[in-house]
Image (cartoon, rainbow, N blue to C red):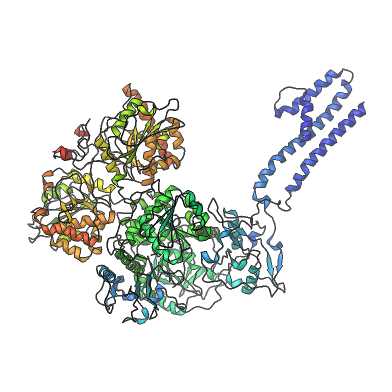
Amino acid sequence: MASVAWSSTRWHSCSGTMEWEEEAACVIMCASVKYNIRGPALIPRMKTKHRIYYVTLFSIVLLGLIATGMFQFWPHSIESSSDWNVEKRSVRDVPVVRLPADSPIPERGDLSCRMHTCFDVYRCGFNPKNKIKVYIYSLKKYVDDSGVPVSNTISREYNELLTAISDSDYYTDDINRACLFVPSIDVLNQNTLRIKETAQALAQLSRWDRGTNHLLFNMLPGGPPDYNTALDVPRDSPRRYFLLSSQMAVHPEYREDLEALQAKHGESVLVLDKCTNLSEGVLSVHKRCREHQVFDYPQVLQEAIFCVVLRGARLGQAVLSDVLRAGCVPVVIADSYILPFSEVLDWKRASVVVPEEKMSDVYGILQSIPQRQIEEMQRQARWFWEAYFQSIKAIALATLQIISDRIYPYAALSYEEWNDPPTVKWSSVSNPLFLPLIPPQSQGFTAIVLTYDRVESLFRVITEVSKVPSLSKLLVVWNNQNKNPPEDSLWPKIRVPLKVVRTAENKLSNRFFPYDEIETEAVLAIDDDIIMLTSDELQFGYEVWREFPDRLVGYPGRLHLWDHEMNKWKYESEWTNEVSMVLTGAAFYHKYFNYLYTYKMPGDIKNWVDAHMNCEDIAMNFLVANVTGKAVIKVTPRKKFKCPECTAIDGLSLDQTHMVERSECINKFASVFGTMPLKVVEHRADPVLYKDDFPEKLKSFPNIGSL
Amino acid sequence: MQSWRRKSLWLALSASWLLVLLRVFPLLRLAVPTRPWAGAPQGWPRWLDAELLPHFSQPGELPKDDLQPPRGPRGGSCDWGSCFDVSKCRGGRLKVFVQPVAGPISDAHRGILASIESSRYHSVSPDEACLLLGLEAPAGECSPVPPQWNGGRNHLVLSLHPAFCPQTFQLGQAMVAKAGPTVDTFRPGFDVALPLLPEAHPLRGGAPGQLGQHSPHPGVPLLALAEERGGWRTAGADSSACPWDGRCEQDRGPEQTHPGATLPNATFCLIPGHGPDALHFLQALQAGCIPVLLSPRWELPFSEVIDWTKAAIVADERLLFQVLTALQEMPPTRVLALRQQTQFLWDAYFSSVEKVIHTTLEIIQDRIFGASAHPSLLWNSPPGALLALPTFSTSPLDFPFYHLQRGSRPTGRFSALIWVGDPGQPPLNLIQAVAGSQHCAQILVLWSSEKPPPLRWPKTAVPLTVLAGQRKASDRFLPHTAISTDAILSLDAHSSLTTSEVDFAFVVWQSFPERMVGFLTWSHFWDEARGGWGYTAERANEFSMVLTSAAFYHRYYHTLLTHSLPEALRTLADEAPTCADILMNFLVAAVTKLPPIKVPYGRQHLEARPPLTPGGPESQPPAQDCINQMAAEFGSMPLVSSRLRLDPVLFKDPVSVLRKKYRSLEKP
């Protein structure tokens, strides 16, 4: 930095303001000016020579500056790229560890281990993200006394797996903060392991401690996945075989059973075996035979609806993943085989489990499954493959997620998150108030009046609302910061508690804030100018809300329409036969929606509403419809409301701009939600005997709809 | 002068060069990777030769082990495939025979027997049954080896109470359904874990969940702690940092100790995982207090099918403080969902002994069904697996309950099912009115009269089929295979509806596919004088039943009524036709817990008397009584009252009739 400061002070003294990019040129000019001042005698001789010196000198200084500057800024980007902090070396260079023949062998695994007995949770302390921290031991090469390697240093798959963990949120490089340890000793394939020596190698890991909190990955012995693109395209053509068995090493007793099935059901069952007469150079693993007919494997799996996964030498079978990938429904015939990730994956949705004893009946069992369920299973099988088995990375992350869910059960993924395919997740709605429950009438409701300065009208509303029998509390949200609310003595005297909440800012969303003062589940939002609702109408509205506690229950109804000419949504307040929204100028709803509006409103809708001072009611309608998937309930006949649309002094034009604004809101919200959640219905709620030929005085709510 | 200047210039030049080099060199050195900086996060190395690494197994590599014979080693442990002979269950149907017990039996025991006998699984002969059920004597008397024991194969030993008698015979291959089994002896997928029921648990019906509202009341304390003596101690939100006895003496202030019988009133209930506390679990569930189980040593009840993560939190007791922090910070959305799920589960599977036993049998039936068992969604969302029969369909889309969860809609048409009893008059006007509806898919005439049906029927826009009935009132609720739509419009020959009414009612039904949508209503009431339930057809401000002589409902209710209700109830319906209406309303209300929906009906004079009973309900004591008999069979009164009617949006509004879609509803 010193050089920069020096040069700039020196040369800047001669000129005023100049652009950084033009400095070089300017400086030269300055220099010449300087010498011109020095005296004529010197100039003719010195001029050219010194100019070169100065130019050279300056350009060097400048170069230095630029170079310095560039290196000041560059290294940051270099540091963050992984190439810089990770070693670039070969696997062959890893340190060698010699295991003495008498080094300790760890105890046998304790079969009775449970999460709460064998797992040391104290290592997994409180974690704001509720994710476990995983440490990976560094790679070493283990050799025995005579220098023979214990195993392959690391396989390509295990390297991939560790890379996936290292790149994930779970990874930590601090062994002291880790809750789970992953050895870098590759035990994926049991066949290539030297069991005793590997155990010794594991035992000398620095935090082994009888394997507590250590995670070993042991995959099925089988063919490595080959990512054949042709296979990854699901086929829609009908599948030729109903049931297919493609395994090679099958116990003769089972093979007899399978052959019997084939003999009985003919073409629809295909039982394949190893090919005996393949020409040289053809990999037997990619071929299966039926007598002399040769089939390509695993492509042939795509031709079948159901594929058998049979008990082989080991319970687990690599064929399962081939079958899933082909979108074939696995038929698992292996008693006490625990399907992968069965702790969280619902295999009933993607497979058929048949007890070994019932093997001869398998055809009949499968035939009884309805076609629609089979299609569902095929989709589910493919989705499992894509989400959890497709790559080593997917397997590694699913494993860690399961362990993490066990340790932080209150933040665990739900059954739906694990099992529902994306298409279902997108279209499904999980209503937050799903329990069919009619809240007790005794609880009553809290009325929330949003007001600015219309005190007279406000007092009338308060007096009117206080006549409603089920009102239990009245909350006035005073949204005017420049004026104090009237003194206590001036407020109308009512039979229920009245509270005034002063807000910090004049915002429309204050109406929907989940105030601590709201003690009831039911909330009545009412404007300070809605004086035309009768006590009967409000009480009836509350009764309707009790029967529909998960909906917006309101008085004036509105509709959204698709404008075909403009190709966008339009707001409609005319006398229509349908409703899709109710205005929150007078509406009952569950207080939980206040919480949702304040804290869970998608996108920038909340700020947008506050900025435009409009459409908070439309936003609430969108929110509730989106989260519950249900329509609003409009109560009681239409009245002339003193609503924003109706207050227009200069009727038509103001009305027009208002409608345009409201339509804009609908379009804006629909784009934020990514869909149109509002539901259109053709009904409204009236008292049972409304307008019936029945004595008025015997009706519970006689004063309904009067103007 | 000149040399001085030149020297100074050179000096400046070299100085700046030096500076440049000094700045640049270390950076250049860094550009060449040598080793990572100390302290920088160190991930798994990107090996230069990663692409050259060998695969973990070679193509075609086969397991070295020998091929195992079929049916692997069994040891002492049984699983479903090896220890239960499914082939004994003919047609995949579970049939249960209860082993007779020698000597006197207790009331509780008798109750259990009665509830099994009333279930659809009961069988009177041990030869026909595929499950033999042995009841543990609750008094601790140990029964000898039952007859036909056969090593316990296809036996279920049911023990509702924890006083598990020391076995005089080896359980062997018998399944054990036991309250609160320890995790170590429990055989997953074979044994059934039952809840630990209190002594006085009701046999039928049972108390409803205690939760009156969805969200926690603001004043309710956060935590209740299960105490050794069987009671509950509540702790405020603040004192939760010292939850365990002894450790927080100074915080005793806001806490209250409750006697054993009361239910906890808190948002979360902390339950230690030792054996006796299993009883607390059920209490918490009923109270809607989210159970927080600390490393339970016992298997959670019905864990095979119930997804407990939706209703309870099973946490590690060693991380208590961490758990408490998490509970305090749990978002309201999750709390709301957990609370509601506790109530649903309590009500669906635990509130009575009968439900517990039926759930146990249903689990075993599901194992026998295999692929056509209840999907998980049916077990874990309302109305629960006992009320959603997999024999109807295994796809949730076919039921009326799961459209929201699956993002689907019921089919957009309906089938009209017209029941024609004596005197056998073909309902020609009604057929025309119904066929005129744009939503009508087909008309089915269920001919239940002595007179033979006419050979010629009017030409209609939709297909008309005549079905032969057996002249019983419950005929109309049989799951006729001819019904091709989700919605059924159930009608009587003498019902009278307009096309407009039908159209509007169907549009309303589409919004409420799980409920009944009807025109004529009845209401039930508690008759103090008679000490029983009564009902009236008089017009009132509220109603709780709609008549099936004109009502829309989902076709699933036909299957449910026919296959899940006890025989006795259906016989009752056959005896008095009014009872059929009440039965259907009872059933739908028991499933939905919600009232039916009334839509406007033009001909109000008909409302005065129920069309099915010529003399009116007052003159028919048996009908009055059937509501009480049904209430007894259901164990409680499921009917719920409603005070509203759904009208078209512009119904009787002061606007031009031309604007109105359902204008014929307006006619007086």
Judging depth in this view, the residue of B147 and B488 nearest the camera is B147
Q: How many marks?
A: 0
Judging depth in this view, the residue of A456 and A184 nearest the camera is A456
Expressed as whole percent of the image width and height from the top left, the position of residue B441 reads 22, 51
Does residue A338 appear anywhere in the picture? Answer: yes
Expressed as whole percent of the image width and height from the top left, the position of residue A123 reads 58, 59
Instruction: Reply above or below: A294 against A80.
Output: below
Q: Indicate the quadrant containing the C terminus of chain A: top left, top right, bottom left or bottom right.
A: top left
Instruction: Reply above or below: A16 against A676.
Output: above
Q: Indicate the quadrant containing the N terminus of chain A: top left, top right, bottom left or bottom right.
A: top right
| Quarter-of-image position of residue A216 | bottom right
Query: What residue is at 30 percent from the left and 34 percent from the top?
Result: A465
Expressed as whole percent of the image width and height from the top left, the position of residue A453 reads 38, 26
Query: What residue is at 26 percent from the left and 51 percent from the top?
Result: B515
Instruction: Reply above or below: A41 against A126.
Output: above
| Quarter-of-image position of residue A131 | bottom right
Would residue B48 appear left or right of A420 to someone viewing this image?
A: right
Expressed as whole percent of the image width and height from the top left, the position of residue A516 reads 42, 41
Would residue B438 appear left or right of A226 to someone viewing this image?
A: left
Judging depth in this view, the residue of A2 and B262 nearest the camera is B262
Does residue A580 appear anywhere in the picture? Answer: no
Would residue A27 appear left or right of A573 to someone viewing this image?
A: right
